[in-house]
Amino acid sequence: MTDIHNRTRLWQRARQAALSTAIGMALAGCAVGPDFKAPEAPAISNAQNPYTPVPLPAETASAPGTGGAAQRFAMGQDIPAIWWSVFHSEPLDRLIRSALAHSPTLASAQAALRQAQETYNADAGAKQLPSVNGQLGVTRQRESQAASQIPGGVDFTLFNASVNVSYTIDAFGGTRRELEGLRAAVDYQRYQVEATYLTLTANVVTTAIQEASLRAQLRATQEVIEAESRSLDLVQRQATLGAIALGTVLTQQAQLAQTRATLPALEKALAQTRQQLAVYAGRLPSEAGLPEFTLESLQLPGDLPVSLPSSLVRQRPDIRASEALLHQASAQIGVATANLYPQITLSGSVGAQSFELNQLFSGPSAAWSLGAGLLQPIFNGGSLQAKKRAAIAAYEQAQAQYQQTVLNAFLNVANTLRALDSDAQSLSAQAQAASLARESLDLVNRQYQLGAVSNLALLDAQRTYEQTRIALAQAQAARYADTAALFQALGGGWWNRAELADAKL
């Protein structure tokens, strides 16, 4: 018996301690679980060269002609909200604005954000404020003789009206942590919208550049075909006069046919690129009215912004979205921890009951009740502790994913910066190669007309020139594509848009 009394007293003390702790924490307004702090930017050992192991030059190499201007790296320079304006193309700007207005992908992301926001609003309203419900009812029933003490029993109608109020005190901050997690889910969807916005604008720009590149390659191929056709006419005249063998004519015809055979593939790629551009703009592929882009219609910006690492982690939408998921996982630890502690619920009601409807709100019909309840988990097979450990593991997973997202972002920037430098050098070399190939072809043509070189030498010069012209167009387009890739890698300037002017980086 003594042992039973001791256990009873211990249980009563534990219950009193739990209740006192719950009331104290409710008054203090504290919340269990970790308070989330945004991760710090990665530590950079070399502030002068934060992204690549080899220092970048102050400016890229230059080359004559389209897309050959030197570009300077401006460390710490901000990015404009309308980042594609650096290409100074009004048709491109109009197309992107049309895409932003009509893209189903962007509309879907925006709808997901509204859903997350309304989910938060619904839970915040239900959990932060008392629940108040009105009830009005009528019941027709019969009581037996035994219950009513009336011979034969009695039939009666009972009218009732009441207002019920209940409120669960957020003693340990579980509700606050849950709402914190929902707010983080809203932030995640907001950054998903920004990521979709950035991807859409970058896709339109790079696809327009791809179209311009294909047009340049087609133009170069057609010019080569014209040159080879002139050579074929010359060879045929010489064969007619008996100056050369028929085999030479056949060889030149085969060369011309091979060059012409490359046109269908380029034309197909151009058609597919324009169809893709139409879909990015929210149009059917068959719709007309898309602007045509050439490399000459785009201007290469002279200054290239390079964000500081501390700014990059606040600018990239994918990093901010991953941070929001980390925040949400942190809040879930608080929710799981709060579930281990008592829950205090207050309730009350006021109303009226009457056998006559016209007397429901008058006379001695008033009824009311007040109540309070304490729910303390005692035994649940270790479920609540396991859920807390699971929440901690989920946070550690989100933390690792965040770190990987940051590493990938820095890799993306590093690769883009290196591509800008390397492709500028490649264009410089390619421009020189194209110029020399043109000079060589002109010289061989003159020599061939004088009979100083064979037809084989002319064919080799033609093939070399064709290859260098197409490679030059590709190298020129790469400079524009690299520039667009850099603006995308640095976040696209979403924080400078008017509607996001108050966004905190």
Image (spheres, grey):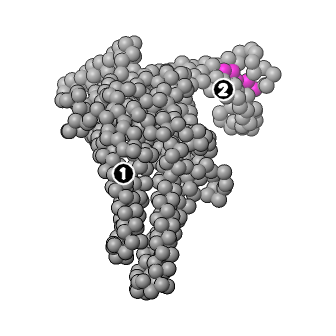
Q: Distance between the residues labelled 2 and 1?
A: 81 Å
Q: Where is residue 290 in the image (x, y as percent from the top left)?
A: 62, 50
User: Looking at the image, can residue 445 be seen?
Assistant: yes
Which of the 4 image quadrants contains residue 465?
bottom left
Judging depth in this view, the residue of 492 and 107 nearest the camera is 492
Q: Position of residue 406 (x, y in %)?
A: 30, 38
Three-letter code, disc 1: Ala
Position above or below: 265 against 189: below
Q: Where is residue 267 in the image (x, y as percent from the top left)?
A: 53, 64
Residue displayed at 49% across by 48% down: 295
- For label 1, the residue is 431
- For label 2, the residue is 134
Q: Where is residue 464 in the image (x, y as percent from the top left)?
A: 35, 65
Position above or below: 333 against 421: above
Residues rendered magenta in the picture: 351-355
Judging depth in this view, the residue of 206 and 221 nearest the camera is 221
Viewport quadrant of the C terminus: top left
